[in-house]
């Protein structure tokens, strides 16, 4: 009986020292583009960038909205495999209409921003 109790305590202590920590997942940003009449805009050009030291932005990603007027971006930093937080400038253009905004993408979260173009 005493050996069984000792074995149980030993196994319990081993499991209590193990960690359940997991690296966080990458953050996702969704940009929704609306026109002046609050209709979603398909095929609008979306540019996500970070401000540079000389005032110009470093382009991280450039793409187009889907038929629902949404552009989805998953932030995967190229230098590391770890998820990091990032704040990006959002620029949108469709024909002669433009708009801008800012999005903050955090690990394990989905951030959304709505940009109206005029």
Image (cartoon, rainbow, N blue to C red):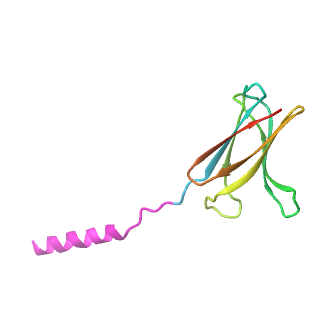
Q: Examine the rendered structure and indicate whether residue 20 appears above or below residue 117.
A: below
Q: Count the marks: how many?
A: 0
The reply, left or right, for residue 83 in relation to residue 40 is: left
The reply, left or right, for residue 45 in relation to residue 27 is: right
Residue bounds of the magenta highlight: 1-22
Secondary structure predominantly adopted by residues drawn in magenta: helix
Quarter of the figure with the C terminus = top right
Question: Can you give x and y, in whole percent of width and height, for residue 111 in the image?
Answer: 62, 46
Report the residue at 63% width, 61% height from top: 81
Q: Residue furthest left?
A: 1
Question: Can you give x and y, in whole percent of width and height, for residue 34 in the image?
Answer: 74, 31
Q: Examine the rendered structure and indicate whether residue 33 appears above or below residue 60.
A: above
The reply, left or right, for residue 57 in relation to residue 68 is: right
Quarter of the image for residue 72 reads top right
Q: Is residue 71 magenta?
A: no
Q: Examine the rendered structure and indicate whether residue 112 appears above or below residue 51.
A: above
Q: Considering depth in this image, is 105 or 75 the residue closer to the camera?
A: 105
Q: Examine the rendered structure and indicate whether residue 18 appears above or below residue 84.
A: below
Report the residue at 22% width, 71% height from top: 9
Quarter of the figure with the N terminus = bottom left
Q: Is residue 4 magenta?
A: yes
The reply, left or right, for residue 78 in relation to residue 53 is: left
Question: Can you give x and y, in whole percent of width and height, for residue 3 in the image?
Answer: 14, 74
Question: Can you give x and y, in whole percent of width and height, for residue 66 in the image?
Answer: 72, 32
Report the residue at 78% width, 29% height from top: 35
Q: Considering depth in this image, is 84 or 78 the residue closer to the camera?
A: 84
């Amino acid at each position: 009986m005493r050996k069984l109790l000792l074995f149980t305590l030993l196994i319990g202590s081993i499991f209590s020292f193990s960690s359940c920590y997991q690296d966080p997942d990458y953050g996702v940003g969704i940009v929704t583009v609306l026109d002046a009449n609050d209709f979603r805009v398909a095929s609008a050009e979306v540019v996500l960038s970070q401000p540079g030291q000389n005032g110009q932005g470093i382009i991280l990603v450039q793409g187009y909205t889907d038929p629902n007027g949404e552009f989805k971006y998953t932030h995967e930093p190229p230098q590391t495999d770890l998820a990091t937080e990032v704040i990006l400038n959002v620029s949108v253009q469709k024909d002669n209409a433009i708009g801008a905004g800012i999005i903050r993408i955090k690990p394990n979260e989905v951030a959304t921003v709505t940009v109206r173009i005029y």
